[in-house]
Amino acid sequence: MNWNAISFDWNQIRAFLATAEEGSLSAAARALGQTQPTLSRQVTGLEDALGVTLFERGHRAMTLTQAGHEVLAHVKDMGDAALKVSLAASGQSSHVEGKVSITATELFARYYLPSIIAELQQVAPGIFVEVITSNDVRDLTRREADISIRHARPEQPDLIGRLVAETTAHLYASRDYLDRSGRPDGLDDLADIDLLSFDEAENIVPFLQGLGMPVTRENMRASTASGGLLMELTRAGLGATFLTKEAADRFPELEQVLPSMAPVPVPVWLVTHRELRTSRRIRLVYDLLADRLPALMAAAADDQSAEKSE
């Protein structure tokens, strides 16, 4: 492939990146606020310019070809560079100012948002960030927040979402608790386990039963909307709860209960109102979150895996 002879259209590059990240043309179109036919033409135009097939077209999904993977490695660097230029230019503008509210769970906000907010202060010092920590899904349609970090895909038609990362949750308890109560060998052994939760029993018990856990309301020992307090209750040996691996692996006293149990998928969606993407300050924060969160989560997982292997 003669890269020197190719003249790139940045819109085609953005379309390709979004499609590779989102996995389908429809999802990529929503992420970029474009129509699907327009996005499809841009991707096809890049394939024509490069003379290669970048995607295998399925009924609903777009799968990268080997050539697509090779091109992706190059254009990701271009995308990062373009974002840095955009952030630097916006940060120097006195017009990029005002409040942007972000809602996320307490643990997610604690572990991932500080470094992003620090970078934002450097590139756009006129933006004031309000972080709302809550396990409840804030209603973006009523402007209760500008940007939401959710663990479920948005269903409302006036919201746009971008899947930025995926992780898993597992049942964890302290080693002290498991030493006292015993380590389960199978799902049936969870019938007497003490449970801690971020939600009330009538909501969480049906979910756990759907995972095959033979639990009832009597298993519930405490619930709290505070992710930090839930973590401390678990570390104190008061029961077991579901935590993401990245959160639990930060505390060596926590142990996965019944490792053979299937993990619970935890997608990370970045969501905002469609109209708000036209706001320069909200678009700036949204794009920075979309760019930084996947790398931060991947780095946290890699660091914890390295620590365990030492």
Image (cartoon, rainbow, N blue to C red):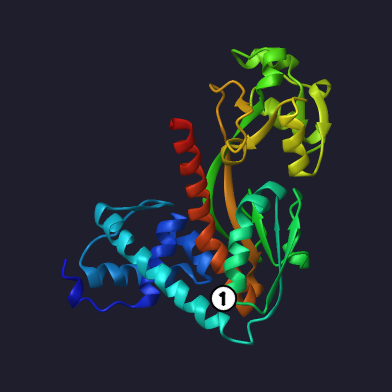
Note whether residue 198 is visible: no
Q: Which image quarter holds the N terminus?
A: bottom left
Q: Where does the image place residue 67, in percent across and percent down from the top left?
A: 24, 57
**In the image, is 274 to the left or to the right of 304?**
right
Q: Secondary structure at mark 1?
A: helix
Which residue matches tag 1? 123
Task: Determine which quarter of the picture holds residue 219.
Answer: top right
Instruction: Please give the name of the residue rendered at 61% of the width and 66% of the height, measured from the top-left corner.
Output: 118
Instruction: Please give the name of the residue rendered at 25% of the width and 60% of the height, measured from the top-left corner.
Output: 53
Q: Which image quarter holds the C terminus?
A: top left
103 and 56: which one is in front? Answer: 103
Q: Where does the image place residue 27, in percent across and percent down from the top left?
A: 50, 59
Question: Please, is residue 164 above or below residue 188 in the view?
Answer: below
**In the image, is 74 to the left or to the right of 186?**
left
Q: Where does the image place residue 97, in percent across and percent down from the top left?
A: 67, 81
Note whether residue 114 is visible: yes
Question: Which residue is situated farthest in the front direction here?
Answer: 310
Question: Which residue is situated farthest in the left direction here?
Answer: 2
Task: Determine which quarter of the picture holds residue 254.
Answer: top right
Mark 1 neighbour class, 10 Å CA radius: few under 14, some 14 to 19, many 20 or more: many
Instruction: Please give the name of the residue rendered at 78% of the width and 66% of the height, measured from the top-left corner.
Output: 142
Question: Which residue is situated farthest in the bottom direction here?
Answer: 94
84 and 306: which one is in front? Answer: 306
Q: Where does the image place residue 245, in percent across and percent down from the top left?
A: 57, 37
256 and 279: which one is in front? Answer: 256
Question: Please, is residue 148 above or below residue 209 in the view?
Answer: below
Three-letter residue code for mark 1? Val
**In the image, is 257 to the left or to the right of 223?**
left
Question: Please, is residue 147 above or below residue 209 in the view?
Answer: below
210 and 239: which one is in front? Answer: 239
Instruction: Please give the name of the residue rendered at 40% of the width and 64% of the height, measured from the top-left corner.
Output: 17
